[in-house]
Image (tube, rainbow, N blue to C red):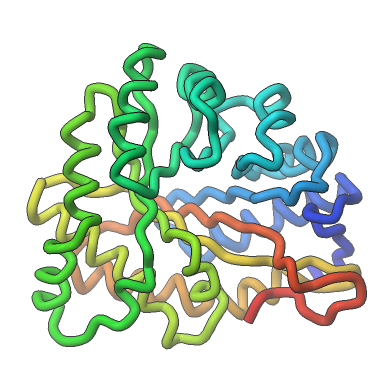
Amino acid sequence: MPGLQVADPGVAGRPAELTAFVRSLRAAVSSAFPTATTRIAWHPGPACDEEDLLALLEGGSDIIADSYILPSVTSSIPARRLVLPAAACDGGTLASAVAGGCGRVVVETDEEIPALAFTAHQAGRRARVVLAVDGREFSGLSGSDQDMSDRLAEGAAIAALKEILRRQADLELVGLQEADGCRQHVCAGPGRIGPAQGLMLLRRTFWATDGFLLPMVALPASVSIRAGSDAVMSFREGCLSRLAPAMYRTNARLGLPMPVVALDLEPFEGAGPGSSCTIQQ
């Protein structure tokens, strides 16, 4: 959308333009991954108000909630549209979100798994769980596919996935997500696509060991929007044109179907007024 003018939701803004931007971004991602269901989730900054949140929802984005915006989010946004990091919640907030049918709860540590299972059991509802994995662990792997699978199978990620699956009466294992520290790979050069390919290998390994195909992979990215920028086209050319083919090729080589692709976005904090940066490269 050439000439689209959008306010960074981390700063605040014009809701109509924000809704239009999210819709265009969803269309771009769906075009890049035409055979897979795609989801967009946005991490609003602490300055994002309720009007901005509603604009994001209207555009089709889910909301990534953390300690900055949880008070307003829990009262104004349907639980099914929330992506909720378990570490960001107190017990009451997490229990309320799970009971309401939270779209995705992200766990990052072993300790969070039994705690979330207990919360879900008390609420009488299964929690939809995504395991956050440090994608940097995979970016330096080399050698044959079998070598990589062996290394992944020995890691803590497989053990955590098995633990979630063991508690499936209370937890629904949805998929994998790259943990903090890996956001830059999505918008970087081809050499940084390794973490996403590593998640594909982790899916294959878990399928081989437990016969369970992880249906979703969530990939973080940082986006900065400024007045007059063609942010959607930049994102398509700078990110999706490299990421989508790499994921397709990897899945085809491993004999796996494409996962549901969830793109979790957050404003790029380094781009203030007048900045020339639109997409973190």
Q: Image quadrant for the C terminus?
A: bottom right
Q: Quadrant of residue 115?
A: top left
Residue 273 x %, y %:
91, 71
Q: Image quadrant for the N terminus?
A: bottom right
At x 27%, y 57%, the residue is: 257
Front-most of residues 39 and 170: 170
Q: Quadrant of residue 6?
A: bottom right
Is residue 80 depicted above or below 154 in this figure?
above
Residue 82 x %, y %:
57, 35
Residue 83 in sight in this render: no
Front-most of residues 255 and 119: 119
At x 45%, y 86%, the residue is: 190
At x 54%, y 74%, the residue is: 184
Left or right side of 9 for 111: left
Left or right side of 148 for 197: right
Left or right side of 16 for 67: left
Is residue 9 depicted above or below 32 in this figure?
above
Residue 197 x %, y %:
32, 72
Left or right side of 57 for 136: left
Residue 254 x %, y %:
19, 68
Total tally of numbered discs in the picture: 0
At x 71%, y 52%, the residue is: 22
Residue 169 in sight in this render: yes
Is residue 214 depicted above or below 7 in this figure?
above
Front-most of residues 93 and 227: 93
